Image (cartoon, rainbow, N blue to C red):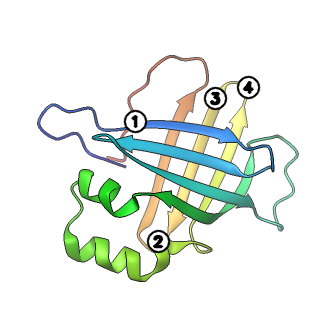
Amino acid sequence: LAKARDGEEASRTARSIAANGQYVVSQTVAGRTARFVYDRDAAATIPAAFAGRWVLAAVEGDHDGFMQACGIAPEARATARDRGYDVGVTTASVAQVGPLFREVLSGPAGEVTVEFSVGGGEQRVSDA
């Protein structure tokens, strides 16, 4: 997750299910947007729309610029680019109970857990 710098907003994130059934997470940091597109993991069989295990299928937008806006060093950005931004490797496991969501993002760079409430207004999220 992006860290706030110099009093700037850390990031804005939107999650949705696309018409083709893909789970899409869009993040904007300092005016730079990256979209992470996940396909449902064939091994996961949870019936709820968002709930389940998703595999990163694509990274769209100016991902290098997005990572730079997050304060990620050039060497780390180059490594991520060389690894294809971990498409096909990174997963998002989503659990939903009513309006409450827990999303665990797992990949070679580590694991981050995000919890949020739909309809709860703007919410601060941190990986610390």
Residue at image coords 80%, 40%: 49
Q: Residues within 10 Å of mark 3 (few under 14, many from 20)?
A: few
Q: CA distance from mark 1 to mark 2?
A: 22 Å
Q: Residue furthest bottom?
A: 82
Q: Callout 3, which amino acid? A: Leu
What residue is disc 1 on?
125
Q: Residues within 10 Å of mark 2 (few under 14, many from 20)?
A: many
Side (left or right) of 70 relative to 25: left
Residue at image coords 69%, 43%: 95
What residue is disc 2 on?
85
Eye-nearest disc, 3 or 2: 2
Q: Callout 4, which amino acid? A: Gly
Q: CA distance from mark 2 to mark 4?
A: 32 Å
* Disc on res. 100: 3
Task: Choose the circle earlier in sequence order: 2 or 4.
Answer: 2
Q: CA distance from mark 1 to mark 3?
A: 14 Å
Residue 22, given in percent of the width and then of the height, sits at 73, 52
Q: CA distance from mark 3 to mark 4?
A: 6 Å
Side (left or right) of 72 relative to 122: left
Q: CA distance from mark 1 to mark 4?
A: 19 Å
Residue 17, given in percent of the width and then of the height, sits at 72, 42
Q: Callout 2, which amino acid? A: Tyr
Q: Tag 2's secondary structure?
A: helix
Q: Tag 1's secondary structure?
A: loop
* Disc on res. 98: 4
